[in-house]
Image (spheres, helix red, strand yellow):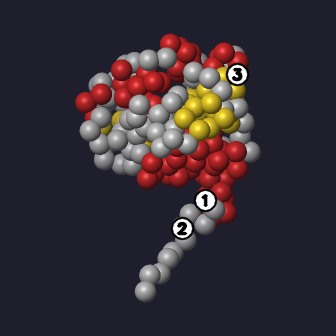
Amino acid sequence: MITVLLADGFEESEAIIPVDMLRRAGLDCKTVGVYGRIAVGSHNIPVVCDIEANEINFDDVSTVILPGGMPGTLNLKKSEFVINLVKHVYKRGGRIAAICAAPSILGGMGLLKGKNAVCYPGFENELDGAKVSELSVVTDGNITTAKGMGVALEFSKELITLILNKDTAEKISRSIMEKNNTEVK
């Protein structure tokens, strides 16, 4: 199972776009309320989560996605459940993905030492030991990081490519008309 961990103050697009894209790819992706069934985003959009933290069997989780946003990132960072789940999945070779400010959580856990990573500008000093990239989305080993909301589709496509394959990611991208051109007169 792929889990998207939600705590109050999460950036809505950084959570919902990956859930939508991964489900379009046919993957088992669940939103997890870290502090309860309902999590309220940074723009006051409430989301009813699929499951709560206490319903998770760590061994069933193959991928953990951490959306950013404030104070969502801080609320994830202070959760013992989040830290323990990330450690468990990482140690088992599962995939860890974080976007915006959330890569700072991985940096604080020491998981980015010697790895290429990226985050929302201004949080680079919290990527302890990482080689900070200028790219929008970076995968190094089993960790994927991304800059922020503006690259949520690219982040999602990267995850689909890694979990399934590039053809599926491209097919879904075409189906949502991601590369649609516009004309303004």
User: Based on the displayed image, in which of its 4 quarters is residue 120 positioned?
Assistant: top left
Judge whether 18 appears above or below 59 on screen.
Answer: below
Locate the N terminus and report the quarter of the image it occupies: top right
Label 1: which residue?
173
Name the residue at 70% across, 50% down. Answer: 24
Image spot of residue 133 (x, y percent): 32, 42
Q: Residues within 10 Å of mark 2 (few under 14, many from 20)?
A: few
Label 2: which residue?
179
- Mark 3 or mark 2, which is nearer the start of the sequence? 3
Name the residue at 49% across, 17% down. Answer: 79
- Mark 1 or mark 3, which is nearer the start of the sequence? 3
- Tell me if 151 is positioned left or right of 92 in this view: left
Name the residue at 55% across, 42% down. Answer: 45
What amino acid type is highlighted by mark number 3?
A: Asp
Find numbered disc 3 in the image and state the secondary structure of the residue it sits on: helix
Judge whether 16 appears above or below 116 on screen.
Answer: below
Camera-nearest residue between 69 and 58: 69
Find numbered disc 1 in the image and state the secondary structure of the residue it sits on: helix
Tell me the number on the disc at residue 60: 3
Locate the C terminus and report the quarter of the image it occupies: bottom left
Camera-nearest residue between 25 and 123: 123
Find numbered disc 2 in the image and state the secondary structure of the residue it sits on: loop
Image spot of residue 147 (x, y percent): 39, 44
Name the residue at 54% across, 35% down. Answer: 40
Image spot of residue 56 (x, y percent): 68, 19
Q: Residues within 10 Å of mark 1 (few under 14, many from 20)?
A: some
Quick check: marks 2 and 3 in contact, CB under 8 Å?
no
What amino acid type is highlighted by mark number 1?
A: Ser
Residue 41 visible in this rendered orientation of the protein: yes
The residue most toward the front is 44
